[in-house]
Image (spheres, rainbow, N blue to C red):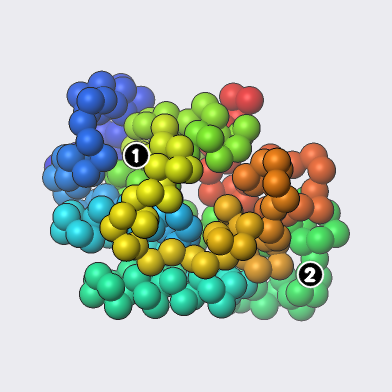
Amino acid sequence: MVLKDEINEELAAQLDHETKNWSVIDTLKYLAERFEGTTTFSTSFGQEDQVITDMIFTARIPVLVFTLDTGRHFEETYKVMSQTLARYEKKIKVLFPDQQKVEQLLTNKGPFSFYESIENRKECCYIRKVEPLERMLKETACWITGLRAAQSNSRQTIRRISYDPTYQVIKVNPLYNWSLEEVVTHLHDNHVPYNILHDKGYPSIGCAPCTRAVQPGEDIRAGRWWWENNSSKECGLHDNQENKQL
């Protein structure tokens, strides 16, 4: 078992090298054993996350699956969550934002302050997403995500396994080099529940007020915070040194 204070860049590089030719499932099994009891996977029930959830639950890999419920999700997102719980008969830990901070934000700035400035939007994201994630990762040594390099310009530098200095965890992006076609094929071939909004032009799905469908030829992340012209299209969950290289 690896302790939290033993996690660093050298360990991440070692793990990446050691498992570089392994399958996704074999890598996840190994990491769950190596970081016994402290390996977690964060899902927002998007296409990539559903692929990883399917692998974890089907192979019975001992990884804690959790989700951040911002209180502003699409109804379709809750439906795919319900379908996932029914399909695999496994629990998914749900984290909510701090009630007092949400109440204070809406009292002082109203329900749509995020449309007014990037600063306001990041404040909302921080309260609803980042702080709950920070609580979860305090007890986590190995954090698995569904990030893919092809999702956006800001994610092109992500690695398969790296050290995240923001949260002081080993960060694993097992689908980092997968194409969207590979993701969709896995979902269809394995009959994995997925968000029907993906079929309506929503490749990336976040909070309902902050997500729209994208047009043909637009970047995959163009539908997130579409009113912002000069932002990285990130909420802060993955806004670490890895992405700041751009």
Residue at horizontal 34%, vertical 70%? 84
User: Which image quadrant is residue 45 in?
Assistant: bottom left
Residue at x 61% of width, y 62% of height:
200
Q: Residues within 10 Å of mark 1 (few under 14, many from 20)?
A: many
Circle 2 is placed at which residue position?
Answer: 112
Q: Position of residue 104 (x, y in %)?
A: 70, 74
Q: Position of residue 22 (x, y in %)?
A: 21, 31
Residue 93 shows in the view:
no
Where residue 30 appears, as percent x and y from the top left, is 16, 40
Q: Amino acid at mark 1?
A: Pro
User: Which residue is denoted by mark 1 in the rendering?
Assistant: 174
- Disc 2 secondary structure class: loop
- Image quadrant where one finds the N terminus: top left
Q: Is residue 231 above or below residue 204?
A: above
Q: Residue furthest right?
A: 116
Cα–Cα span, label 1 and label 2: 35 Å
At a point 24% along the width and 55% down the height, the residue shown is 56
The residue lying toward the viewer, choosing from 56 and 136, is 56
Left or right: 43, with 104 as reference point: left
User: Which of the two marks, 1 or 2, is nearer to us in this view?
Assistant: 1
The kind of residue tagged 2 is Phe
Most foreground residue, 117 or 147:
147
Q: Is residue 122 left or right of residue 14?
A: right
Residue drawn at x 80%, y 40% is 230
Q: Quadrant of the C terminus?
A: top right
